[in-house]
Every structure is written in C-alpha cells, then in structure tokens.
Image (cartoon, coloured by chain):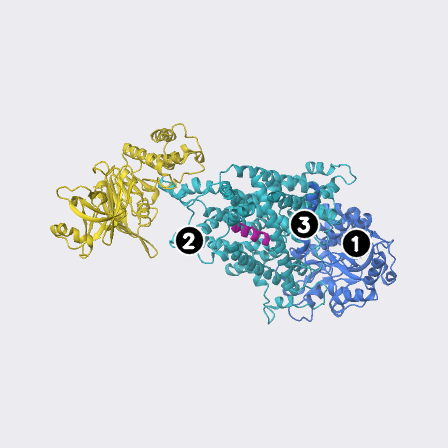
Amino acid sequence: MKKNYTRFFPLIPLIFFGLFYFYPLGSILKLSFAPEGKLQLDAASKLITDSYYLRTLWFTFWQAVVSTILTLLLALPAAYVFATYDFRYKQTLRTISTLPFVLPTVVVANAFSALIGPRGLVNTTAQQLFNLEEPPIDIDQTIWLILLAHVFYNYSVVLRIVSAYWQRINAELTQAAETLGASPQQRFWTITLPLLRPALMAAGVLVFIFTFTSFGVVLLLGGPGFATLEVEIYRQAVNIFDLPVAAALSLFQILFTFILMAVYTRTQARIATQSSSTHMVAKPVTTWWDKVIVWGNLGVMFTLLAAPLLALVLRSISWVDSNPFLYYAKLFDNERGSVFYVPPIEAVGNSLLYAGCAIVIALIIGLICAYLVVDKNNWLDPIFMLPLATSAVTLGFGYIIALDEPPLNLRNSFILIPLAHALVAIPFVIRTVLPALRGINPAVREAASTLGADPTRIWLTIDWPLLRRVLLVAAVFAFTISMGEFGATIFVARPDSPTMPTAIFRFLGRPGQVNFGQALAMSTLLMFVCSAGFVLIERLRLGDKSVDGSIDQGEF
Amino acid sequence: MSHLEIQSVSKSFGSTVAVDTASLTLQQGEIVCLLGPSGCGKTTLLRLVAGLEAADGGSISLAGRNLVDVPTYQRGIGMMFQSYALFPHMTVAENIGYGLRMAHEPQELIGQRIGEMLDLVDLNGLGDRQIDQLSGGQQQRVALARSLATRPDILLLDEPLGSLDRLLRERLLDQLKVILKKVGVTALYVTHDQSEAFGIGDRVAVMNRGSIEQIAPPHEIFTRPKSRFVANFLGLSNVFDVSHPHSTIIQQLEPWLNDQGRNEGAVLIPPYAASLTQREGLLLLKTIVQGYSFRGRFALLSCQVGEHELAFSLDPYLEEGLIGRDFKPGDELELWLNPQHFVLLSH
Amino acid sequence: MKKLIVLIGTTLLIAALTACGSGEVQPVTLKLVTHDSFNISEETVAAFQEQTGHTLEIVPLGDAGEMLNQNILSKNNPLGDVVFGIDNSFLSRALENDILVAYDSPELANIDSSLKLDAENRALPVDYGDVCLNYDKAWFADNGLAAPSGLDDLIDPAYAGLTVVENPATSSPGLAFLLATVDAYGEDGFLDYWDQLAANDVLVENGWSEAYYEAFSLYGGDRPIVVSYASSPPAEVIFAETELTEAPTASVISSKSCFRQIEFVGILSGTEHEAAAQQLVDFMLGKTFQEDIPMNMFVFPSNSTAELPEPFVAYAEIPDSPATVSPSDIAANREAWIAAWNETVLR
C-alpha cells in the first residue's frame, strides 16, 4: 500500500476537472437543452439553418486563421533574434512582450485609441507634419484593428515558444546544410523551418484557440459590425437570455476545438523528439547584418507592443494638475467614503493572493495531468485543453447552477476565483511540462530503481531537476492568466475583495476625468506588478543556479 | 601546386587564441589528420577551411581558388560532423541527395547518384529509412555518403568516429579508409585519437596551442617526434633534460651524449629501445624494478633510475627467458638500450 | 472503496483550497445581490447595521444583464436575500421568471407613481436616471456650431459625423437611447430616423466606456456628441482633474430625447430571512440611503423627500418629459427592434 500511493494521484485532476469543469458545464447544457428533462434540439437545428450563425462561424474561423498566420509571421523573426543573439536587456524585452497578456481589453482598446485613433498621437502628429486634412490611419472599427490587437496579445506566445525551441535545434544541422551548398534561403526553407514545425504548430494552435474564442477584442475594438462565436454566445446568454442557442453555440465551439486539438496532439506524437547536445550558443551582435536584423526586430516589437503600453503610461499621468501623479494619489484616497473603495495596496494584495493560489493549484494539477498524458493516453491531452475553448459565460452560469449545494456551495466563495484561474492555466502548464517530461529517458528511472531508490526519491532525484525549470515557465503563465483575470472569473462573485482588474472596470464604468485617470493609473500599476512578478518568478530558479538568462524551455 | 593551401591562418575568440599562424598544405588525394588534445585548435582550423568560422588573418586556397571571401555553401567542400548532423526530417536517400538538390541537379541524376552512394557505403535498400531507424554505424555511413555525394574538392571530417564505441570504431576506420581511397578524395581529418590518426592519415599533423607542431607520415611522427610536446602526446614519456648533469640517468648516458656533442635540449628514450640482453652498440642502464606486467603481445616494465621513473615495453617473444620470469619491486636490473632509437629533442 | 477515495480526495482538495481563501466566516447576514455599478458609502451601510442589527454583505455579480440572469438561474437556491438594480428594460424578464416576492413597503408612499411599474410591488423603484445625449461644450463653441437641442438635430447634415451611440444589443444606455427614439418617432417611424442617422455618419460602439472614453471628443475622440446620462455633467465636475466652476459637458433634455431608466429593488423568492429583507428594502427606499445614492451611483433617488446633493442641484438637469416605453412592450419587442435596428444601422 505504502509504495503505491502514487496510483491515487490521477484522481486529483480527474476530480478537479470533474467538479469544476464537466459538472458545471454538463449542468448548464442539461438545463439549456432539456429544461424539463426532455431533450429539445430546436436551438441546434436553428444554428444550421440560420445563415446568420453560419456567417458568424465563418467570420470566427477566418479571422482566427488570419490572426494566427499574422502573429506567426511577425513574431518568427523576433524568435530568431531571441534564439540567436545575445544582447542587452534581452530579459527585460521578453518580459515586456508578455505584458499585453495581462491587460484588460478595455484598457488596451484605450491605449490603441490614444495611439492610432482618429485623434490619436500618430494621426495628429502625421497631420501636423504633412499638413493632412484627414487622419492617415483610419482603422477604427475595422478588421485591421482586430487583427492588430490579436497580434498584440499573442505575439509573446509565439515568441516564447518558438525562440525556446529554436535555441535547442542542433546548430550543426544548418552548418551541415551549409557545407552541402545550401544558400541561407535554402537552409531556412529546407532545414530550419521544417525543424521548427513542432514549435510553430504548438504556438499556432494556441494562438488559434485564443483568437477563435476572442471576445473582448472583437466586442470592444471591432465594434458592432463584427461578432465571433464567443461574442454571440455572450449576447444570447446575457442580452437575449436564450440559453438553448447559447449552449448549442458553446457546445459547437468546444467540439470544434476538441477535434482541432485531437488532430494536433496526434501529429505531435508522430514527430520524433530530437534531442541534441550541441545547442545553439547565443552570439553577440557584431556585423552590420546582425545589427540590422536585431534592431529591425526590436523596432517592430517596440511599435507593436511597447508603444501602446507607453501610450497608456503617458495617459495615466496628469498633464494639467500640478501633481503629475494626481491619479495615482487619488487611488489612495476614498473621498466618497465608498463601501467599495479598495486601497491599491489591497487590490494588489488580493490579485497576488489569488495568483499565488492559482499558481499552486495549476502547477500541482497540471503536472499530474502531464504525467497522465505521457504515461497513459494522448486522448486525455485534448480534453485537458478544453477549458481554454469554453465560453466564459457558459461556464460561469454553470457554476451558478451546479455549485450551489453544500459541501460544494462555492458560488460566493473566494475559492472559486483561483480555481477558475487555475482551470485556464492548467492547459498552459501541461503544454509547457510535456516536452520536458517526454525527454526523460525511462531507463534512467529504471536504473535509479535498481539502485534501490523508492518512487519519491526517484522523482526527487531524476524528474525534479529536469522539471523545475519548465515549472517556472508554467508558473509565469499561470501568474499572467490569474493577474489578467482570464475566463469565467468575471462571472464569479467576489464579495469585498476586488482585484486590480475589477478595480479598473469599476473606474471605467463611470464618467469623469479622475475616474478615467485612475483606471489608467491602476492599469499602469498592474503592468508594474506583473513585471515585478515575472522577474521574481524567473529569479527563483528553484535552487537551480547553473542556468543562464533564459529559462523558457517549454515548447508547448 | 598543392590542392589545399593554408597559410599563416589565425583565429581568436575574444582573448583566446584558437589558431595561431597555422600553415598546412595537402596534395590531391591525400588524407591528412589533424591530431591533438582537446582545445588545441584542430576543430577550429577545420571550421576555418569549411568557412564556418572567419579567419582573422592568413589565407586558404582550395584547388587554386582563394577562399577568403567565399561563403561556406559556395566552397565546394564536404563535411562530416561528430554528431553526423543528419537531417531528422528526411529519409536516408533525401539526406544523401540534399546537396545535389541544393545545386539544382536534374532529378534523374540525383536518383542515380544516391544509388551509387548507397552502394559505396553498403547501405543498399535502406534509402527510404528514417534516420532514427538506423544504428550508429549506419548513420555514420549515411553522413559519409551525404558529404561525398556532391563530389567535393575536399572532405572535412570532424571526429567522425568519436561517438562510437571502441570496437565499432576500429572496424569502421578501415572501411572509411577503403572508401576514401576508392573515391580518391582529398581529406582533412580531425581526431584526438592517435591510433585513428595513424590508421587513416597519409600524413599526420600534430597541433599544439593553435599551431602545427609537426607534420609527417605516421611512422616518422612516432619514431622521430620533433618536440617534447609531440612525444608526450604520443605517450612517449621517457624524456630527460640533457642540461641536468647531476641527474643519474644523464650521468649514465653521458658518454653517448658527448659523442653526439649535445649539452642542451632533451633526450627521448622510446619504450621499445630496451632489451635484457647485451649486444654490440647497446648502452647499459642500471635500474631498480618498480613493476612488471605481462600483457600478451608485450610486457610492461617500469623502473627507477635515480629520481626518474621510466617505462619500457619488452618483447617477450624475442627476449630469451622472459616468459615466465618474475620481477620483484626493488630488484636491481640491468637494461641494454639501443641508442639508434633515441631522439634528441631541441626543446 | 472507490467512493471512499473519491470522498477523501474531494475533502482534501477542498480543505487545501479553503486554506487558500483567507478564512471566510459566515455570520448571520443579509446578502444584497447587485450589479458592478452599485456603490454606497460606508456610513450608510453602518447606519443600516446599527439600526437593524443585521450584517450586510454586498455581492456584485457582473453587469445588470449578467446579474439578473444569474438570479434567474439560481432561483431555486438564491444567491442572496435582496436584489438591487433590475432596470425597466429587464423588468419583465425578472417578473416572468418569478424571482421576486411582493412587498408593500411603507416608503412607497414617498415615491412618484410614474416610477412604479409593477402593480404587485414585487419590484420597487429605488432610483432613476435619464439616458440623454451629452455634448462637449468647448467643441461646439470652438467650431461655431449650435449645440444640439433635440433628436432631430442629429440628422441635420451640419451635424454629420459628430455623434457616437452605443449598440443596443450589448449596452444598456444604447438600448435606452433606442427606446427613446421608438417613443419619439413611433414604432413605424424610428427606423427611418436611424436610417438618416446612419446616413449622417453616426458611430456605434459596443459599450458605454468605449463610446465615452474613446470616441467622445472630451477624451480625445472625434465625436462631440455622445449618448450618456443626465448625471454625467455633474460627474465631470465632481471628478474633474482641476476644480471647475462649470461642467465641460451638458445634456440635451428636450421632450422625449431622453429615456428614463428606473432601477428596482426586490426580495428574492426563497430567502430565509424575509422579515430582515423587508427591513433592508425599507432602508434602501428610506431617506438615508436615498440621499446617499446620487454621489455614489450618479442617478437620482426615487424617494421624493430625499434632498439632492449640491453638485446635482447646480449641474444636473432633469428632463421634464422623458420618453417612456412600458416594460411589457420592451419585453415583447426588444429583440425585434434590435434586429431591425441592426439591419438599418449596421447592415
């Protein structure tokens, strides 16, 4: 008995997914499709017959494909630069590239409008410089703004996954191609690109799922002319309160993603994992060509990622008042004596507390899930990815009707918040941990076991040293997801413990310069807290001192 | 005119000098081994020829063509890597035909050449295999076939047997030499293993600290090492400074040294220079036995002369009465050395 | 056995999770379920707790629509005892789904009958606010154009490209403004109006925050007319960066150009503390709470005895004859109106 305690580990994720994903989801689907216990499928048939839904589906699909391709194209050169070169502030830049991930869409929408809106910085400057009547950039409420925002949000996903994988490609392979007469272009198309395929696929699949289920970007930046499935689900569930249609759309979205993931995991399993001893060594920037490519990419990153963030910071400063930090000061001041006032320190504290809990839950459960996928079946893998593809409002309503009885009356509980965050973070943890886990040679474990090590010791001496680095990467993702309040949490009650994003929403919900300023100040604060969090997590290293700057080994 | 000419080539990485004004020439069809300890610059020199590193100074020309500003992929070279660097996403045939495809050769010519190469390396019928389905020895042969398929002007080999076990290495070394000679390719071969270098090289270049210390055919390198470093690297350890007149061993060899007119530098006494029987022209060396072991083809004797320790290999089948004889540590023993084998080293 | 393991596993997991959630205790307490825009001062909450001895816990559940739907979904096991913030556009949905119990509060005597939309007093009016066009005073002064005075001005070519409204499908002020046009131009005429508005280059945003904080010229957009609230001008004074003597914006309050949103409170059916819940309703309709409403939620108190705070008296204008559409008409036609609007404006 004592030796076999590990066999009960698989129960933990199964219980977790069962209780906090499948049970609530099943409950809301049951209520929607069979309110009186009898199955009614009118809604489902409506989806197939009504051309509006088909058009919505088509738009959802193609904008996701285009967003994914654009993100891959734009981030690929940067992945090359990060994998190949060693330059100053590389870590800082990597951190900044992840920041968009945590910002609420409404804040990002504002940053974009401050930068490239009709009266934004770029347009007014260009108009003054070139004496133009009309603003030269006019992409407000167009598909271009949606695509731009999708690239803004997902750039770092591609950058991190692909550059980490690129670094691990055996440098001798491209050199061999070079000695065989392959020109730089030929080498890229025949060697590098095919070898990068697993990483490109992994990043592409994640970006596709994100943009396929895009909600805030489409709703807020696309304007009323565009709707994805997720937007339509929200409209049906909240505005029209047509649960059968909402549920049918959600189910469709889940099934679509499941099939996509199943195909993806199958192709992934077929690709032989190649491990090599000769990793690429990052080289300094020396020749003029090095400079062109590095600075060129940093320029793109600045324009795409840093400029909107910077616009946000600039707008959080008061240019009228004598105190430029007026809005920040106001954050500390409960003028109206509001019962909802939350000191910024406390909002930061709440956010960090939830993030801490979410990280712990997501890492433990995600790690066990990854072991399950490696040991048992690949079909579990697409199932564990489902929370990413599930409409937040559907799951949120599921929580309301499913988790209402003791001992699971969690509807009004704190616990549900980190739980919901963890649910979304777990797919990231799995994708990060899997490759490392697959790379552990089983013979090493067997050898350890013949030397008399018990399972705990084997894990501590063989698995842990190999996993601790990727677990840090996973922790960064879990932290990001929790800080940015992804997923169903917007439907989870949070009695008097507002987080930073909820505080931002509160300020943005009412008129007045100071409210607006405070929202931007809080957003800026959120960015700084997240940056500090990334740095702290990446510094942890869990006792692993031998590692250099780059810790992101996950290939997804 | 030489086929490959390396003249005063240098390369530094930061403050570390990897190759220091090295010069070397290869004749058409010749196999030259670059031999040396790790860090001596042999791999860097090879990569300079390949163009994978840019030289700081000096010149390299191949078949009469100056390579200085020629990028690797236009140099007309073939290279075998220690890791083989086979493309994991291609089959055996695709790997072998890669260079020809890059040169836009016609399809049927590529197919024909792949067949020839599979034949050459004895991998007929394995063209459609994936790389990870091959054994280590098979992978090595695919790498060889791939680098020869384009008929390179020179083949560069970077420890091509380094990742194999000893037994397999011995066997493949012979096969490799046969194939290289059959093709008649000029080859530069990097290794740290002396028997590998002697086995395959027409000439061996011993490298030390970025320079070529000595270049000569294998037998000459072994019997006439030019420097103390070469002797040491080849495992010839009985080297003594001549300029130490008080050393016991030098005192015993003094008459011979005086005949040679030497009073500086060092003398190398090769391990095969000793015998137990006195003959005309041999020098007497009084020693104290330290250890003895019978090794089959030879017997190993270590002994002490004054403060020095010497090692000799004796031939049990030529030395009368040696088989079955026992030496005890501390026994006094008279050895007879053949001075013809001695080498005087300048430094 | 399996069941036991599952049970133990669940218990352990939940214990671990509870440890994460900073030790929440469950005192006997009244839960007020509401939307995210709800706000009130600490003093008022303290006053209630002092007066009645109950503890008040406020549970925000998303926006008004999300909050209502969650209450409907949980009606067998309600999320709280009292709900605040069901408005007239959603009132029918709440009443049809039977989530409220009737209560004839004595405070109803002080409430204008025009606000009472539920004859059975399941939903009791607690506040109201008018959704009106707001305009940027400085912009009109700078551009030498007369400020708009009613809905008709918006379709005047002189006002082309000046207006931003919210999408009625996704925004509550957007819906309110659509309803205003329905009342003003009639069910047969409002689409004509919107057709002309679209021809006059109206901008539609999905939410109030985007319309007000991005498109409105006061915040850097290029639209000087926005659909917002009659209380927005006083809010601009109260939340000004520097002290202002005059609001930078003003509302258009001419006849039927505004739509009155009325918010209701009600006791959730299934509450275990109905008597206490009635006390809370009385309190919310009473003077203390009512007078605290304007400065916290920027809407007007329903209780006519409540006195308005100074900035509201100075800067807020209340339309005399706002547009009205009955909740049953709204419930019956909303989707059709929105769909028709969609066809006309967005195509």
Q: Which chain is represented by blue in the image?
A: C
Q: CA distance from mark 1 to mark 3?
A: 46 Å
> What is the total number of numbered labels drawn onto the structure image?
3
The disc at residue A276 is: none
Residue behind mark 3 = C12
Q: Position of residue A65 (x, y in %)?
A: 57, 42
Element at badge 1?
Answer: loop
Q: Residues within 10 Å of mark 3 (few under 14, many from 20)?
A: few
Residue identified by numbered label 2: A292
Q: The chain shown in cyan is which?
A: A
| Mark 2 Cα shell of 10 Å, populated few (<14), some (14-19), many (≥20) | few
* Colour for chain B in the figure: yellow
Report the front residue among A242 and C224: A242
Main SS, magenta region, reads helix
Q: Is residue A316 above or below residue B281?
A: below
Residue C285 can be seen, yes or no: yes
What range is drawn magenta here? Answer: A468-480
Q: Which chain is mark 1 on? A: C
- Residue at mark 3 shares a chain with residue at mark 2: no
Q: As shown in the figure, which amino acid type bears the numbered disc 1?
A: Asn
Chain letter for the residue marked with disc 2 in the picture? A
Label 3's element?
Answer: helix
Residue on which the image places disc 1: C88
Above or below residue A522? Residue C198 is: above
